[in-house]
Image (cartoon, rainbow, N blue to C red):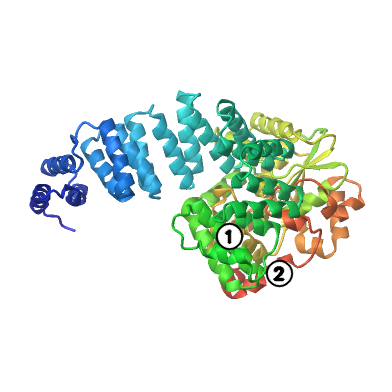
């Protein structure tokens, strides 16, 4: 669009004279977008800004911040953003306006613009700690978790005692499912701020995820002793009880949380994890009334739609359920920033690094033998871990993040195959991590599904390990992934059926190449065969792992260990058939998926 500068200048003078300077500021800013160095427009903007704020346009100072806050309170965020955009134009070398504008844009949900201006504030003042923390928050909300972590660590490198940065790092690490590290940061922050109940609840959530349920319960009890009606604490207590298999207790906590805060969409979502809904329940109408509530944050909206999708699936309304899944995943996709090509490049790199001809370590006798249970998410890894960990010689460690992190750290140091020293560091670091909570178990199960990407590495750094590769109907797997609300935004592909299918194709290609490269490197376990005839399949797994048969493995529902995955209710139900066919209720909506794997 062509802009007539003289006309803009005339309008500016006329509006200033009429006492309506604020109404023409946007027009001048628009003209400066097209002509950023035009001196006459910059002069006009300064005159407009001074007339609108009754403050000198330059230099920017505390009075300008106070005026911005007053405008935001009385006239709304959009007018305040415009005022600060003008301040940025007029004070291009001052970091404050950039940071304030970035914070306002973040509040408005305009994350790319927020990230841009907060980054500019840091360029102007690399020691502007508040801007660094806000940049990390904006990046985190945009799904750029590695960048967010780098931003907050930049702040902490300059000032290790800057508590807002320590708290933000704890929250980012928790989002990355690096719960042990997150817990340490939460604990350090709480040492200085013991009354911060939100941080204490965050610590409890990390402890729950990492399996330290006793400590998690202590922190939640401390919060609830001071704030008996804290809905977040009640909800997290519900999650802890769900992890322990106490479905009735979990349900009671989620329902109490909803009584205290009827808008708690995460409590509603979690209630659906603890029980099924029935048609006509008041809670369904209550939650549906929030669908168009724009005051809900994006995480609350995501939880609401996933919760409603589960509820409508329970009452057999497939169309409504699928519609809510689409809305939930569209919101998640806006945060995920996923690229299938990035995963394609990673898979190719790993296949080359860990090819058979690359260096390898010799096997040795281990005090604890790792058993890797891997494959696609939702392929039966949780059930298999529950079966194996029912054996008296086996400890189930859950989904350990340690191996992917060790591999990533080494891959950043070198291109090509890992040498013996790198393999040794990975081996030492991984075996040390296996000690946590293993007691006197001789075998430890690591059921991180994504370890299928590093099968070649496992064979080289941990040749004693046993690897069980779970296989399941691809339609059932992809559908189950799409309808599950995962806490880890870094997964990315789960927000789109097309991306999930694409990722599944990459997985199939990689597994075929691992199978050709390491013919005896792992055991394929068919999930449908396991649920149809459990004992032969379980005996085969145990024999492959070097374990004697134990009848406890036939009753995994009696295994009292904590289960910390989306499959928590399923594994408490024992070994049963039929779950792979649940997608058929949604068949009209899944034609592309069905055709893809036909």
Q: Secondary structure at mark 2?
A: helix
Badges 2 and 1: C-beta atoms under 8 Å apart?
A: no
- Name the mark on residue 581: 2
Q: Is residue 527 left or right of residue 198?
A: right
Q: Which residue is mark 1?
A: 306
Taking depth in this image into account, of 70 and 594 the one nearest to the observer is: 70
Task: From the top left corner, tell me how far across and down residue 96 is, in percent.
Answer: 31, 33
Q: Position of residue 369 (x, y in %)?
A: 80, 38
Q: Is residue 542 left or right of residue 292?
A: right
Along the line of sight, which residue is nearer the eye, 157 or 500? 157
Total tally of numbered discs in the picture: 2
**The C terminus lies in quadrant:** bottom right
Residue found at x 65% / y 71%: 279
The residue carrying pointer 1 sits among few (fewer than 14), some (14 to 19) or many (20 or more) residues within 10 Å by Cα, namely many
Question: Where is the N terminus found, in terms of image quarters?
Answer: bottom left
Residue at 66 percent of width and 72 percent of height: 584
Question: Is 425 drawn above or below residue 236 in the view shown?
Answer: above
Q: Evaluate whether residue 81 shows in this view.
A: no
At mark 1, the secondary structure is helix
Q: Position of residue 136 (x, y in %)?
A: 45, 38
Query: From mark 2 to mark 1, how far is it between C-alphas?
Result: 20 Å
> Which mark is in front, 2 or 1?
1
Residue 365: % across, % down: 83, 33
Please tell me which of labels 2 and 1 falls first in the chain. 1
Taking depth in this image into account, of 170 and 277 the one nearest to the observer is 277
Q: Which mark is residue 269?
A: none
């Amino acid at each position: 669009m062509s802009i007539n500068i003289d006309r803009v200048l005339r309008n500016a003078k006329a509006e200033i004279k009429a006492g309506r300077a604020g109404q023409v500021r946007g027009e001048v800013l628009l003209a400066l977008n097209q002509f950023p160095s035009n001196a006459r427009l910059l002069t006009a903007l300064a005159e407009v800004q001074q007339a609108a704020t009754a403050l000198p346009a330059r230099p920017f100072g505390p009075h300008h911040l106070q005026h911005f806050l007053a405008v935001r309170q009385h006239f709304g965020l959009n007018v305040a953003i415009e005022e600060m955009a003008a301040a940025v134009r007029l004070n291009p070398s001052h970091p404050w306006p950039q940071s304030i504008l970035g914070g306002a844009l973040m509040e408005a949900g305009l994350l790319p613009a927020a990230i841009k201006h907060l980054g500019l504030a840091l360029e102007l003042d690399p020691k502007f700690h508040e801007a660094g923390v806000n940049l990390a928050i904006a990046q985190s909300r945009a799904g750029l978790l590695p960048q967010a972590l780098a931003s907050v660590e930049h702040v902490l490198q300059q000032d290790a005692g800057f508590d807002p940065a320590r708290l933000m790092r704890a929250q980012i690490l928790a989002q990355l499912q690096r719960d042990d590290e997150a817990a340490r940061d939460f604990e350090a922050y709480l040492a200085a701020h013991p009354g911060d109940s939100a941080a204490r609840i965050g610590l409890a959530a990390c402890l729950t995820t990492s399996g330290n349920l006793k400590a998690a319960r202590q922190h939640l009890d401390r919060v609830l002793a001071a704030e008996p009606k804290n809905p977040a604490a009640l909800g997290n207590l519900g999650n802890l009880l769900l992890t322990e298999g106490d479905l009735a207790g979990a349900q009671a906590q989620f329902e109490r949380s909803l009584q205290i805060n009827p808008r708690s969409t995460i409590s509603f979502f979690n209630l659906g994890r603890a029980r099924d809904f029935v048609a006509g329940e008041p809670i369904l109408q209550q939650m549906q009334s929030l669908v168009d509530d724009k005051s809900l944050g994006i995480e609350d909206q995501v939880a609401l739609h996933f919760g409603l999708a589960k509820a409508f699936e329970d009452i057999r309304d497939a169309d409504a359920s699928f519609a809510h899944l689409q809305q939930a995943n569209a919101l998640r996709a806006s945060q995920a920033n996923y690229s299938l090509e990035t995963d394609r490049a990673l898979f190719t790199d790993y296949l080359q690094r860990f090819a058979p001809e690359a260096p390898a370590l010799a096997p040795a006798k281990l005090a604890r033998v790792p058993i890797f249970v891997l494959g696609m998410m939702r392929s039966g890894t949780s059930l298999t871990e529950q079966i194996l960990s029912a054996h008296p010689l086996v400890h189930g460690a859950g989904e350990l993040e340690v191996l992917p992190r060790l591999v990533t750290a080494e891959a950043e140091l070198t291109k090509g195959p890992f040498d013996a020293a790198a393999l040794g560091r990975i081996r030492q670091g991984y075996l040390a991590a296996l000690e946590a909570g293993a007691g006197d178990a001789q075998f430890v199960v690591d059921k991180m599904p994504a370890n299928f990407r590093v099968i070649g590495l496992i064979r080289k750094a941990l040749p004693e390990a046993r690897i069980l590769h779970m296989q399941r109907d691809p339609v059932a797997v992809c559908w189950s992934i799409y309808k599950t609300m995962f806490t880890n935004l870094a997964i990315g592909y789960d927000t789109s059926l097309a991306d999930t299918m694409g990722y599944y194709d990459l997985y199939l290609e990689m597994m075929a190449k691992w199978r050709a490269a390491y013919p005896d490197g792992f055991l394929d376990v068919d999930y449908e065969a396991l649920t149809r005839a459990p004992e032969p399949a379980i005996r085969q797994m145990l024999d492959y792992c070097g374990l004697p048969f134990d009848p406890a493995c036939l009753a995994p529902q009696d295994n009292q260990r904590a289960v910390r995955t989306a499959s928590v209710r399923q594994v408490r139900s024992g070994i049963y058939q039929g779950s792979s066919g649940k997608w058929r209720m949604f068949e009209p909506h899944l034609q592309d998926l069905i055709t893809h794997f036909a």
